Amino acid sequence: MSLALSHLKSHRDSGAVTDMRAVFSADPDRARRYTVGLDDLRMDFSKCAVDDTTLALLGDLARAADVEAQRDRMFAGEAINLTEGRAVLHTALRAGADEDIRVDGENVVPQVHAVLRAMGDFTDGVRSGKICGATGKAFTDVVNIGIGGSDLGPVMATLALSPCHDGPPVHFVSNVDGAHIADTLAGLDPETTLVIVASKTFTTVETMTNAATARQFIVEKLGESAVAHHFAAVSTALDKVAKFGLDETRVFGFWDWVGGRYSLWSAIGLPLMLAIGRDDFTAFLAGARTMDQHFKTAPLGENLPMLLGVLGVWHRLACQYPSRAIIPYEQRLSRFPAYLQQLDMESNGKSVGIDGEPLETASGPTVWGEPGTNGQHAFFQLLHQGTDVIPVEFMIAANGHEPQLRHQHELLIANCLAQSEALMRGRTREEARSQLIAGGVSETEADRLAPHKTFPGNRPSITLVHDQLTPYSLGRLIALYEHRVFVEAQIFGINAFDQWGVELGKELATGLLPVVKGESAGEGHDASTLMLAETIRKMRE
Ligand SMILES: O=P(O)(O)OC[C@H]1O[C@H](O)[C@H](O)[C@@H](O)[C@@H]1O
């Protein structure tokens, strides 16, 4: 364990804040001092059990992990993804056209903007009806077929920005479960359906299988020649796409220096662009670019991703909390927690350090969540009174998109603020008892019930507030979380940009398919797996 981390741990064990109510009373300026901002975005972390010493020690930890230098290496296009020998340049996808970012000596920004222009032209064509189906009818629906990074980002952002939709409805199919594509295609007409096959590698079995099903859907009604009209593809593996038989104007590339879970800004964002239009997509990129600039230049104590990262590390390494909850008070961000699960857990769910040695400390926490207020009526019981402490990250916009429902938005805001206050304040047993007595309950009954109505409090949360959910603010929010994951990874000492942990299951599934089909006895597989396969096979006879 590094010296900086052991200092942080001893501070947690002996010197850190334990009574949040007391620190708020002692320092009337606490909320202001522990809030940082960027444009209209505010991050209030004053309800975390930290003080100036904690922040100084977290700064030491970040410096000891060389986070700022690593950040600069990432932005400069160095091959910091060491296990795959690749640069990590999702930031180049939202760079201004005049920037110069080099990979192996070549400026990648012109290629990025060329693809953005091609996407924009295609989007304009589809939305205007100039680009149409094989029978000359305009597209009324878009189906994006992809999974993981080729699905979660576009799904999340398309839903988040529904007030900006002025293009055709976009549907998303990811699961290899035939139910997903069957239900999606059920209401659609092949003549007016555009299918995007999105896969970085163009080998992912779910996507290739669903693409074949969609192809059949088109070909059955319109014939083989319709494929070129009704399909587009997004990939880094242009050679593999070529086999699909598409016109090159329908193929949008990206590059191996874009990780799947960081690819929403690339051509993987095509379904989003089709839904919201190229201008709003440009604003979305601009929001991320603003966060990039901030992350690159703001001093550590004012830098949102740095602070969000070190607070995450504080909760994980010093406080040893196993998970964190992401609770957007914004129904349209309902897929944001799922998106962050891939971004965060696929990046930082590692137990081997960058040097190949087992980690001595924990790495990324479990990330989960649901929108508020829904979560309040489900799992918040555990957040308030459960035996585990789970830090919460709340998100709320000052303004909704339904001015006619002002009161509902005010209720939403009040609930968001109330939950973080309740987690922090708690309710002592004495307060619970007095309230019961004031409500007319006998003293004996109050004594019996008070423990159940007591809240421990001192449960940490961070609240992110912004003006409104727009393409710009969504881009900024996502980039904040991308960089936070980066900061944490540097301190954990891991490579955030590979994902070898998803491979073994894929390999075994390939081997088990013939067993499921009854074509192989499945030598080498364990008895439990074989028995399950056999049981299922019999049920299918
Ligand atoms: O875009 P694709 O190559 O089809 O990959 C889709 C997903 O598959 C893999 O399992 C990876 O774990 C993800 O990082 C990736 O986003």
Image (spheres, helix red, strand yellow):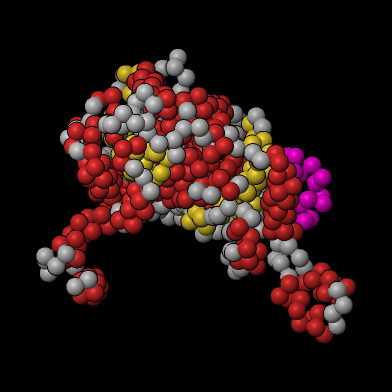
Q: Residue at x 23, y 27 (%)?
A: 247
Q: Which residues are magenta?
A: 14-33
Q: Whole-percent x and y of residue 388? A: 58, 65
Name the residue nearer the viewer: 75 or 57: 75
Instruction: Establish if 178 lies above or below 94.
Output: below
Q: Is residue 143 magenta?
A: no
In the image, 154: left or right of 199? right
In the image, 494: left or right of 63? left
Q: Is residue 22 magenta?
A: yes
Does the image show residue 431? yes
Q: Residue at x 59, y 64 (%)?
A: 378
Give the dominant element type of the magenta stretch: helix, strand or loop.
helix
In the image, 398: left or right of 439? left
User: Where, by quadrant of the figure, is residue 519 drawn?
Assistant: bottom left
Q: Residue at x 36, y 41 (%)?
A: 143
Instruction: Establish if 371 lies above or below 378.
Output: above
Q: Whole-percent x and y of residue 120? A: 41, 23
Instruction: Establish if 470 lies above or below 318.
Output: above
Q: Residue at x 82, y 50 (%)?
A: 26
